[in-house]
């Protein structure tokens, strides 16, 4: 079964608003990453947060990680129409394998 | 090459035929992954190659699916006796295994079984 579950499944906001997506996972992780997918094709890496970190920033992105709750959130501030895409969290487990397990994704639509 | 390359980009096949999907990872990346994504869904893990170790095949949905990686580089995913439920986008990714900080994805192969 998939490691990550994300919510909401779909999110529609106005340009300029903030978008928050959440990811929950099941087992201990080495790190958690967020990816973006346009038009159902290749994914692009956005940001990584390690298991000993609680918050990371990159431009308009802010990621938090709560290992006690096994959850992470991605915040996109001041959203733009170009941010319209699907966003996935991916976990790298601590079991000695570097396998990436992806969540179910959030489809974000930013209205101009 | 500059990135992960997958071919073909699109493939339409008749039910019951075999198909081969190719992935050319980034040079020097020791880890290679195959995922399947059905329309509007998340990424389903299929198989993971890690250097010279035995691959992790735990995600392959049936024995009709197999994959190999020759010479630690190019990988081929083979689906035998295709079924309509095999229709999906098949995504390949590679990464530097020792860091596992970023997976680089190809653009995928969209497989349609008719």
Image (cartoon, coloured by chain):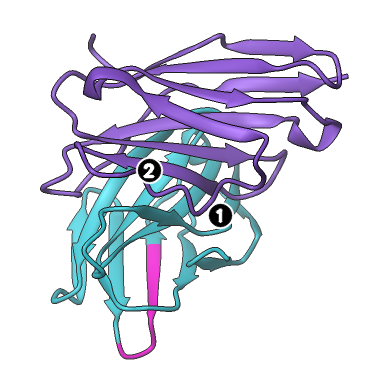
Chain colours: A cyan, B purple
B106 in magenta: no
Q: Position of residue B12 (x, y in %)?
A: 76, 12
Does B82 sit above or below residue B99?
above
Please name whichever residue, B75 or B5, is drawn nearer the observer in this view of the structure. Answer: B75
- Secondary structure category for the residue under label 1: loop
Q: Which one is in front in this view, the residue at disc 2 or the one at disc 1?
A: 2
Task: Tell me which segment is drawn in magenta.
Answer: A68-74
Residue at horizontal 49 percent and vertical 56 percent from the top: A17
Residue at 49% from the left image edge and 54% from the top image edge = B58
Q: Which residue is mark 2?
A: B48
Q: Can you say whether A107 is above or below A6 in the image?
A: above
CA distance for labels 2 and 1: 21 Å
Please, what secondary structure does the residue beneath circle 2 have?
Answer: strand
Q: Is residue B108 left or right of residue A31?
A: right
Circle 2 chain? B
**Residue in the foreground of this view, choosing between A25 and A64:** A25
Q: Looking at the picture, how far across and down is residue B35, in whole percent?
A: 51, 40
Whether the magenta-drawn stretch holds residue A70 is answered as yes
How many other residues sit within 10 Å of disc 2, few (<14), some (14-19) or many (≥20)? many
In percent of width and height, residue A47 lies at 26, 51
Residue A95 in which image quadrant:
bottom left
A58 left or right of A45 in image: left
For the question of whether residue A80 can be seen, the reply is: no
Q: Identify which residue is drawn at 37% across, 72% down.
A: A72
Q: Are marks 2 and 1 in contact (CB under 8 Å)?
A: no
In the image, residue B37 above or below residue A95: above
Q: Quadrant of the C terminus of chain A?
A: top right
Q: Which mark is residue B47?
A: none
Q: Quadrant of residue A2?
A: bottom right
**In the rendered image, which residue does mark 1 sit on?**
A105
């Amino acid at each position: 079964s998939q490691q990550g579950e994300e919510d909401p499944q779909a999110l529609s906001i106005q340009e300029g608003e903030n978008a928050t997506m959440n990811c929950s996972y099941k087992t201990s992780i080495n790190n958690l990453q967020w990816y973006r997918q346009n038009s159902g094709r290749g994914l692009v890496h956005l940001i990584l947060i390690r298991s000993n970190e609680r918050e990371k920033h990159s431009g308009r992105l802010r990621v938090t990680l709560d290992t006690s709750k096994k959850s992470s959130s991605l915040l996109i501030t001041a959203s733009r129409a170009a941010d319209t895409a699907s966003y996935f969290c991916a976990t790298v487990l601590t079991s000695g394998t570097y396998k990436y397990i992806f969540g179910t994704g959030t489809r974000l639509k930013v209205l101009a | 090459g500059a990135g992960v390359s997958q071919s073909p980009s699109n493939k339409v096949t008749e039910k019951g035929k075999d198909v081969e999907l190719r992935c050319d990872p980034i040079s020097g990346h020791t880890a290679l992954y195959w995922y399947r994504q059905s329309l509007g869904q998340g990424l389903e893990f299929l198989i993971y190659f890690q250097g010279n170790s035995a691959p992790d095949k735990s995600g392959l949905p049936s024995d009709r699916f197999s994959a190999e990686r020759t010479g630690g580089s190019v990988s081929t995913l083979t689906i035998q006796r295709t079924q309509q439920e095999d229709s999906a986008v098949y995504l390949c990714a590679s990464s530097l295994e020792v860091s596992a900080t970023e997976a680089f994805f190809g653009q995928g192969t969209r497989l349609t079984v008719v």
